[in-house]
Image (cartoon, rainbow, N blue to C red):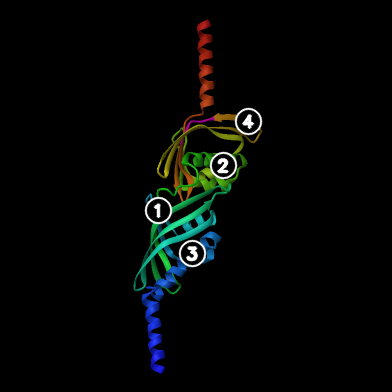
Amino acid sequence: MKRTIITLAILIAATTSFVFGQSKNEQDIRKMFEMTADALVKNDLAALSNYYADDLTITLADGRTGNKTQFLDFVKNSRRESFNFDDVSVRTFGDTAVVNFNRTSTNVTPDGTKSKSASPDTATLVKNGKGWQIVALQISNEQAGNQADGNAEQEIRQTLNTIADALVKNDIATVSNHYADSYTFTNERGETTNKTQRLEVVKNTKRESFSYGDMNIRTFGNTAVVIANPTFTAIDASGQKTNIKDRATLTLVKTNGRWQIVAIQTTNNLLNQAGNQAETEKQIGEIMAE
């Protein structure tokens, strides 16, 4: 009887090992990914800080890289309705592991717009005193057929309308959310400012109205080029109003299911140009009449 029990125990252990085909390390890693997905939906930064190593490096599809602080800041300022790691493949090499998976999520913008996002990614993990932690993450291009709900042009128009509304309200948080960290603004004089500098301008400028008119939108995968006429009424400290109309080229990139502006370049104020032309013609007419 005793021998039968021992044999049965061996068979159960063998079945657990070979039928399920998962070592203890693999089970721990899969469990960690489940908890990571849950933490991303809940914006649980404390939990995520335990799952991602302090020297984390994230490489995006366009070649840009980010660190742990930047990643946690992004999570803090974004919202997800769902997040899943699907088709997870785990390979362990001692205290190192390589994990391939398909990331799928439903993201929610500040105005409530939902978009779906998916990509096949690769993570490298190391086992240390805190357990398994992700030290490197490579994100691929969005998979075809997993673009945001609705077509890209509609999404971009909605994004620019949201920004326009935020500029009138001086809603710095919303504007910041729609400007990429690498955002640059180049004015008609060739002067370039970065995201921080531009947000400071937004903060200290009062606008009665703002709109992007005559939009011409072209998309190239996850990149878009928009030619538009930003038109707005600015109000100075004395209450004087100035109408401004620019011609601008905007470059947007879609990351994590949402469009962000990475660069804007504007021309001279078209209204002022028209006014100067009229004044010049008036002066010429007066000279000719003398």
- CB atoms of marks 4 and 3 within 8 Å: no
Q: Which residue is mark 4?
A: 241
- CB atoms of marks 2 and 3 within 8 Å: no
Between the C-alphas of marks 1 and 2, the distance is: 25 Å
Q: Amino acid at mark 3?
A: Thr
Q: Which residue is mark 3?
A: 36
Q: Amino acid at mark 1?
A: Leu
- CB atoms of marks 1 and 2 within 8 Å: no
**Residue drawn 40% across and 48% down?**
144
Q: Sequence order check: which comes first, mark 2 or mark 3?
A: 3
Q: Amino acid at mark 2?
A: Thr
The mark found on residue 263 in the picture is none
Q: Amino acid at mark 4?
A: Lys
Stretch in magenta: 245-249
**Residue drawn 48% across and 39% down?**
153
The mark found on residue 162 in the picture is 2
